[in-house]
Image (cartoon, rainbow, N blue to C red):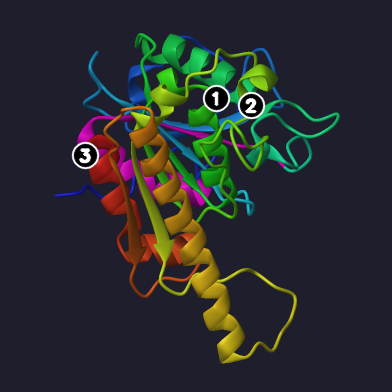
């Protein structure tokens, strides 16, 4: 049985910034908003379950282009409590991370991958947990960030769940980033480890009625249908690309594509149709 929504610490659901170490006992079971002590402009949301132990998993959920961090946190927190997992939801504000989905950031922008590493370092300190591979979820632009982060840092991710990515980076070193993985390792300062990425257990979810956002008010049914087919086709192409790359590296892939029946491309629509629950079972079960 999944418990109710987590208790919030204030009527608006947001705490003032805190930098105390470690977490206070009464903060367990509460959805907190914190900032980095080293960078007060960098926010994240944190949920530590009442049943946390030294073996607890850490689930990182990355928001989409709408920056719906609070929405994701309130959907995932009850499931994190049910599984005894620590939930971390980084906030990549548009003022600092316009292109956060690229993981390396745009020109004159902060590096979102480094921000996540700093957030996790603080979470280890707050919770007393030792560093461990992440259970990583991303939605829309967050799904782009998530699979690219896993490509760049495969040893830091144990399971990967992607929902409605806008674009995909193929695990192909012959294609330059962001179309493929070529050159990504040197851009993030890591050693190339494509087989490590191919061993990550991965699931992809796409809404049955998922279409591109557009400024055109009137769209024909045929145009919408073509758009849906393109988005589903892109997801299948990426999953097939991962499987093909795994075979060429003698790796047994564990990856599947799922359609969220009745859902469009909004996070709330996918969540209401069971995507968050299914992703949590995969990531934490």
Q: Look at the image and give the residue range highlighted in magenta.
A: 70-93
Cα distance in 3D space between marks 3 and 1: 30 Å
Do the CB atoms of the residues marked 1 and 2 lie less than 8 Å apart? yes
Q: Residues within 10 Å of mark 3 (few under 14, many from 20)?
A: some
Cα distance in 3D space between marks 1 and 2: 7 Å
Q: Which residue is mark 3?
A: 82
Is 224 magenta? The answer is: no
Q: How many marks?
A: 3
Q: Earlier in the sequence, mark 3 or mark 1?
A: 3
Q: Secondary structure at mark 3?
A: helix
Query: Residue 217, how many percent across, how many down?
Result: 71, 85
Q: Which residue is mark 1?
A: 152
Query: Residue 27, how many percent across, how many down?
Result: 38, 26
Q: Which residue is mark 2?
A: 184
Q: Residue at x 37, y 20 (%)?
A: 133
Query: Residue 83, how many percent across, how many down?
Result: 22, 35
Q: Would you identify the image quadrant in which residue 198 lies?
A: top left
Quarter of the image with the C terminus in it: top left
Callout in the foreground (3, 2): 2
In this rendering, does residue 254 appear at all? yes
Q: Residues within 10 Å of mark 2 (few under 14, many from 20)?
A: many
Left or right of 19 on screen, residue 256 = left
């Amino acid at each position: 049985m999944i418990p109710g929504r987590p208790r919030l610490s204030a009527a608006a659901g947001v705490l003032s910034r805190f930098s105390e170490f470690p977490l206070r006992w009464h903060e367990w079971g509460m959805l907190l908003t914190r900032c980095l002590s080293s960078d007060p402009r960098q926010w994240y949301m944190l949920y530590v379950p009442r049943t946390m132990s030294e073996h607890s998993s850490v689930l990182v959920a990355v928001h989409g282009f709408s920056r719906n961090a609070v929405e994701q946190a309130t959907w995932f927190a009850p499931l994190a409590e049910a599984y005894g997992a620590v939930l971390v939801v980084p906030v990549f504000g548009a003022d600092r991370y316009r292109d956060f989905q690229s993981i390396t950031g745009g020109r004159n922008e902060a590096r979102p991958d480094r921000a996540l590493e700093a957030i996790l370092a603080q979470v280890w300190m707050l919770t007393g947990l030792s560093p461990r591979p992440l259970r990583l979820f991303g939605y829309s632009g967050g799904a782009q960030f998530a699979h690219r982060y896993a490509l760049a840092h495969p040893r830091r991710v144990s399971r990967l769940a992607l929902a409605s990515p806008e674009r995909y980076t193929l695990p192909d070193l012959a294609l330059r980033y962001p179309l493929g993985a070529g050159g990504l390792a040197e851009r993030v300062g890591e050693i190339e480890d494509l087989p490590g990425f191919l061993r990550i257990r991965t699931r992809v979810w796409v809404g049955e009625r998922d279409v591109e956002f557009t400024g055109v008010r009137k769209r024909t049914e045929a145009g919408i249908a073509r758009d849906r087919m393109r988005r589903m086709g892109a997801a299948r192409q990426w999953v097939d690309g991962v499987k093909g790359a795994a075979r060429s590296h003698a790796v047994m892939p564990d990856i599947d594509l799922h359609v969220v029946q009745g859902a469009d491309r909004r996070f709330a629509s996918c969540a209401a149709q069971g995507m968050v629950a299914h992703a949590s079972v995969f990531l934490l079960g």
